[in-house]
Amino acid sequence: MRSLLAVDLGLRTGLALFGSEGRLLWYRSQNFGSATRLRRAVHGLLHTLPDLAWLILEGGGNLAEIWTREAERKGIPVRRLAAERWRQELLYAREQRNGAQAKQHAAELARRIIKWSAAPRPTSLRHDAAEAIAIGFWGVLHVGWLEQIPEELRR
């Protein structure tokens, strides 16, 4: 089964893996602490995902380059986007008037995606993991694994 990995970039990184049917398989937040540790971890993580077909990154800069270089070595296509891109498509304008509000609504969307996917429910959901889930959901729509937002996820 092909998969798509979504990453909310940072030294504290949100990760979300989706299967080719568009459902969330797992998600987590991980604090790498330094670019050196991140570089080693990215190599190891991508190695454990042999069926990875897409890497979707929110953000840019040096940390994005670490992910991009490793993905390109493995022949994995990479798509970078800004938060505004997925937020415009998945959140209402009134839900993203400021960053804190957008993060709150991204977390609500992420919880609906978790439930729809029958993924394990979180005891707590960090904003970076929630945003990775939203980024990944945007990704499965854009690579064509889902044709539209399922009715269960609409409000």
Image (cartoon, rainbow, N blue to C red):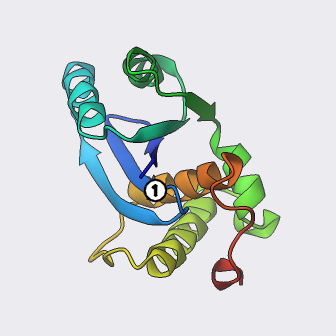
Seen in the picture, residue 57 relative to 90 is either above or below; the reply is: above
Query: Residue tagged by mark 1?
Result: 18
**Rendered residue at 64%/79% (across/down):** 153
Residue 95 is situated, as x and y percent measured from the top left of the image, at 71, 68
Count of numbered badges drawn on the protein: 1
Residue most extreme to the right: 93
Q: Which of the 4 image quarters holds residue 72?
A: top left
Residue 140 drawn at (x, y percent): 60, 53
Indicate left or right for 45 with 129 as reference.
Answer: left
Q: Secondary structure at mark 1?
A: strand
Where's the C terminus, which quadrant?
bottom right
Q: Position of residue 22 (x, y in %)?
A: 55, 62
- Quadrant of residue 36 within the rendered picture: top left
**Residue 26 quadrant:** bottom left
Camera-side residue of 128 and 118: 118
Q: Residue at x 75, y 66 (%)?
A: 148
**Disc 1 residue crowd, few under 14, some 14–19, many 20+, Cα 10 Å:** many
**In the visual, does 76 lie left or right of 32?**
right
72 up-or-down from 149: above or below: above
Left/right of residue 93 with respect to residue 79 in the rendered view: right
Tell me which residue sits at (62%, 61%) in the image.
102
6 above or below 100?
Answer: above
Which of the pair 43/131 is nearer the observer?
A: 43
User: Which amino acid, mark 1?
Assistant: Phe
Task: Classify residue 59 as left or right of residue 155.
Answer: left
- Looking at the image, which residue sits at the far front? 1
Q: Position of residue 138 (x, y in %)?
A: 64, 53
